[in-house]
Each structure stands twice: as C-alpha cells, then as structure tokens.
Amino acid sequence: MTNESKESKASSLERDSQDHPLERYADEKHAEDVHVHHAPKTFGDRFAFGFVKFLRVFADAFFANRYGHRAVVLETVAAVPGMVSGAMLHLKCLRRMEDDHGWIRTLLDEAENERMHLMTFIEIAKPSKLERALVIIAQGFFYVWFLILYLISTKSAHRVVGYLEEEAVVSYSEYLKMVEKGEVDNIAAPQLAKEYWNLSEDARLTDVIRVIRADEMMHREVNHLIANKIKKEDADVKIYEDMSEDAIAKLRQYEARQFPD
Ligand SMILES: [Fe+2]
Ligand SMILES: [Fe+2]
C-alpha cells in the first residue's frame, strides 16, 4: 500500500463534525437503522450482551424517564472505551512497529465525540451532587474494568461497546418520543451543539437528540464491525489493515444514509 493511499484511508476514517446536515436524518425509509441488533453468537458476545442489559437495569431504576440526566451520567461512561481502545492500539503499534491504518484516530474521535455529547447535555440537564458522585465512582470502576476486559479479550471489549451503543440508540429514541409528545420541553439547542453539529440557528432539542443518536448508530456499527473482524480474542495489528477496506465502505455507506425522525 502506498503512503498516499494510507493517508487517504486514515483521513476518510476521521469524523468531520461539519458533515452533519440535519436533513440527512429525516427519512423514514431508514427507520430500521434505529433497531439494528447484533444477535450474540459466541460466549463473549453473550457475556457482553448480558453485562450491558445488567447495566440497563440500574440505569432504568436510577433515572427512569429523566433522560437528560441519564444522558449526562451515561455519556461520561461512553467516552471511556474509545480512549482506552485508542491508547491500547497505539501502544501495540509502538511495540510491534506497525502502522495503525487510521484506526487509532477513529477510536480517539469516538471518545471525543462522546465527550461532546456530555458537554451538550450538561447545558440541558444540570447534574445533581449525587449524580456527580455517581460519575466519579462509575468512572473508577468502568475504566479499570474495561481496560482489564480489553487486555483479556479485545473482541469482547468492542462487543460491549457495540451493545452499549445499541442501548444508547434505544434510550435516545425514547427521549425523542417524549419531547415530540410534549412531555419534555423542546428547548432551544445549546450554542455549543449548534456549532459542533452545524445545526441551524433555530435548532431545538429534538434536532440535537437526532444528531447525537446518529453518532451512536455510527459507534455501534464501528465497534460491532471491529468485534466481528477479530477472529481470536486478541486483535493482531494486521486485522486493522484487513478491516480498513470494509470499514471505509461501511462508514461511507453510513454517511450517505438518512436517518429517521
Ligand atoms: Fe454518546
Ligand atoms: Fe456512542
């Protein structure tokens, strides 16, 4: 592979925050994108799925329908795996002296994108002291737990993220329904969100939820794809090269798609 084609692959995997016109998310033909589910096939898949469903029980019990607060706390957790996976792949590429084929940047972009979700929801729902304490405890456990899982089984770690993103899509869809029904005020979108997603000046909360949900769909696709491609538990750097063609095709296909209201 030439340096030029490597560069174009790397840059094509980068997320362009300006490339999110809201119109792309307004086509009901793609309603199925909201309901995508990877059926667990292996023991690791079932473990990942069970773990995420277990977390969902706690989130439902603690937050119930307070979706703004749920988003604040859960986005602090969602922003961890991309940074851990990116750092681990970076270290592996250094040890093996091999190219990452643009994947370190993709994983770090995911972490940054999740942090922007957090910064957006901080403007919408102010966390209580209890929720701030919960974030600190959750981060302590989840960071260590995810790192250990990644070291034991990179495949299962990415599968966990794939399932977390499936749940995020479901939660944001429920949140969107509540706002549309008028059960939650459809307030003006925070300025930060308008700038980051290139939304119009009169954008509302519903617009913000739609673009964030589309981000979660993208994370879901990318992490399930990585988990599918890893044959054994540990990802050889080589698989990232093999995966690039498929991933770029998938991401381009995804970028061109439109998402439901
Ligand atoms: Fe998120
Ligand atoms: Fe996500």
Image: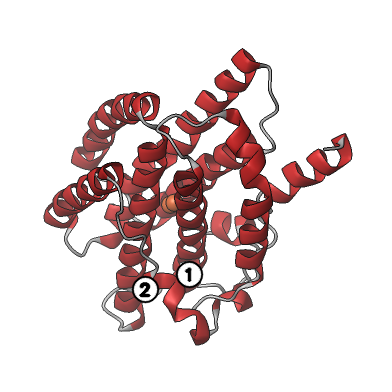
Residue furthest to the left: 61
Res 92 → quadrant: top right
Disc 2 target residue: 176
Give left or right: position of 60 versus 125.
Answer: left
Query: Disc 2, disc 1: CB below 8 Å?
Result: yes
- Residue that appears at 34% across and 53% down: 163
x%, y% of residue 255?
64, 65
Res 105 → quadrant: top right
Residue furthest to the front: 231
Total number of numbered discs in the rendering: 2
- Residue that appears at 35% across and 40% down: 77
* Between 115 and 190, the one nearer to me in the picture: 115
Q: Is residue 187 visible?
A: no
* Between 191 and 51, the one nearer to me in the picture: 51
The circle on residue 210 is 1
Callout 2: SS = helix
Amino acid at dot 2: Leu
Is residue 21 positioned above or below 7 on the image? Answer: below
x%, y% of residue 144?
31, 24
Is residue 85 positioned above or below 128 on the image? Answer: above
